[in-house]
Amino acid sequence: MSGAESDVMVVAGILPLFYRITPTAVDEGPAGTVTRNYVAQDSDGGRWFVKAYPDDTDLDAERQALELSQFARLGGIPVPAVRQTLDSSLIAAAGGMAVSVAAYVENTETAEGGLSGDRWAAVGETVGRLHRTLARHPAGPPRRVPAREVCDVKRARQRLDRLLALLAKRPPASGFPAWAQETAAQRLDALPAVAAMVKRLPTSLTVQTVHGDLASPNLLLRGQQVAALIDFRPPGHRSPAWELGRIVLDPRTVLAEPNWPTVAAYRAANPALPDEELLAVPRLAAGYLACSVYPLSEAVDDPAAVTPELEAYGRNRQEAMAELCERLAEAEAVLRDLLG
């Protein structure tokens, strides 16, 4: 029996034992970044999404993330219901495997293919409602922090210096590591210009509890509507404007010229966020990309994680950053007119 077949059998055993779900079929599901995922069908015809965590996972943090997702769900945000175990836990462990179980969201696609049409406004409205809901989370109310804490150029310099030092020990000749080395050097050289760009952000920015990993793979769409937000991170205070920019200006879609009414729809759903911060969304996104070392750092931190898909994502991020920086004034002018 292969390892994959053995894992399927463990999942099939966990479901009735801990969740009172009698599976009639368990199949491997869509691949996660770090988790193994399965789709189980029960005797009533229902389907369940089973997430299996690696051995070194911080399960307490994962429980907090699941609790945050259910807090958002109680606030009316489209989030899959997490199934509790028979002893009211959100994670079960047996047979060397820890899993969580949630309702399977049928007939959806991720936003990885890009946004278009009415989806832009639907995403803005959903993210606005999400942030308005999470502003009431017990982890703490929104507060203001210096903008440099959101786009930290000094920290970026330290990370780029570290990455280049590690790459210099065994200079790569070709492939992703060579590109990562060249790109990291370019980003390091560009940091003075990035620092000047970041200085034009508002002096302080709002931070609050947010989704934490609101990227296109974690946004499920059905037709022109948002079907679900998935894969929350544990509660942590970050800029909601940064998170909005992260999904609106995802490298997979920014090169297709994003539709700025997304921001107008966000403001209608979450009027508490000041307009000056919404105007800063493209500058925040550009600064964040310029200060990021991911996925360049995977060349030394986790070479096995460098797949063709990750390499393409990294190149898209670099191209998106260049596009944003080049069109920053244009984007801000459009937003200024849109927000009045």
Image (cartoon, grey):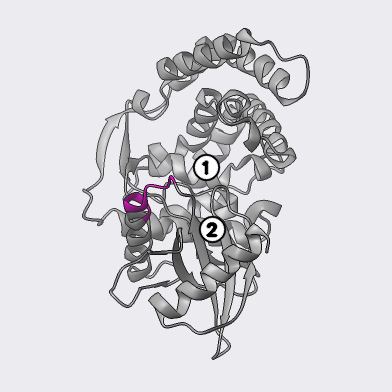
Q: Within the magenta stretch, is there residue 58?
A: yes
First in sequence: mark 2 vs mark 1: 2
Residue picked out by circle 2: 123
Residue 340 appears in the figure: no
User: Considering only vertical position in the picture, is 59 above or below 250?
Assistant: below
User: Considering only vertical position in the picture, is 205 above or below 51?
Assistant: above
Q: Which residue is drawn at 35% across and 66% down?
A: 90
Q: Residue at x 72, y 15 (%)?
A: 172
Mark 1 surroundings within 10 Å by alpha-carbon count, few (fewer than 14), some (14 through 19), many (20 or more):
many
SS state under label 1: helix
Give the image location of residue 44, x and y in percent: 54, 91
Residue 334 located left or right of residue 145: right
> How many numbered callouts?
2
Q: Which residue is drawn at 61% across and 17% down?
A: 184
User: Considering only vertical position in the picture, is 174 above or below 248?
Assistant: above
Quarter of the image where one finds residue 201: top left
**Label number found at residue 246:** 1
Q: Nearer the viewer, residue 14 or 286?
A: 14
Residue 242 located left or right of residue 143: right
In which quadrant will I find the N terminus? bottom right
User: Considering only vertical position in the picture, is 166 above or below 8?
Assistant: above
SS state under label 2: helix
Give the image location of residue 287, x and y in percent: 50, 26
Give the image location of residue 265, x and y in percent: 49, 57
Give the image location of residue 328, x and y in percent: 58, 28
Mark 2 surroundings within 10 Å by alpha-carbon count, few (fewer than 14), some (14 through 19), many (20 or more):
many
Q: Which residue lies furthest to the front in this view?
A: 1
Q: Residue at x 61, y 61 (%)?
A: 119
Give the residues in magenta: 56-62
**Label number found at residue 334:** none
Residue 227 appears in the figure: yes
Q: Residue furthest bottom?
A: 44
